[in-house]
Image (tube, rainbow, N blue to C red):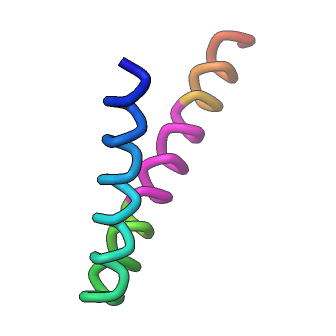
Amino acid sequence: MAQAKKIALWAVVIFVAYTIIHSPARAAELVQVGFEGISDAAKGIGEFMTQLIK
């Protein structure tokens, strides 16, 4: 099982490197979308906690 995880990790690393080299604009766009998603999730948690306290 550890060998499969190692292979999967390397496959992801190679895919990410290929995507960045082949299409840097698209890779930057995907990173931006990811960070926007994380930001929206954090805002949602903050709003939930604020309403919980009130």
Q: How many numbered marks, from 0 up? A: 0
Q: Name the residue at 26% across, 87% down.
A: 23
Residue 39 magenta-drawn?
A: yes
Q: Nearer the viewer, residue 51 or 21?
A: 21
Residue 51 magenta-drawn?
A: no
For the record, the magenta segment spans 34-44
Q: Name the residue at 33% across, 68% down.
A: 30
- Image quadrant in which the N terminus is located: top left
Task: Look at the picture and state if 53 lies above or below 19.
Answer: above
Q: Name the residue at 29% across, 77% down.
A: 18
Q: Position of residue 39 (x, y in %)?
A: 54, 50
Quadrant housing residue 16: bottom left
Task: Look at the picture and state if 19 lies above or below 3.
Answer: below
Q: Position of residue 26 (x, y in %)?
A: 27, 81
Task: Look at the picture and state if 28 lies above or below 44.
Answer: below
Q: Nearer the viewer, residue 48 or 27?
A: 27
- Image quadrant in which the C terminus is located: top right
Q: Residue furthest front?
A: 3
Q: Nearer the viewer, residue 4 or 16?
A: 4
Quadrant housing residue 4: top left
Q: Nearer the viewer, residue 48 or 29?
A: 29
Q: Residue furthest right?
A: 53
Tell me: 8 left or right of 53.
left
Q: Position of residue 31 (x, y in %)?
A: 42, 67
Task: Look at the picture and state if 21 lies above or below 46.
Answer: below
Q: Main secondary structure of the magenta part?
A: helix
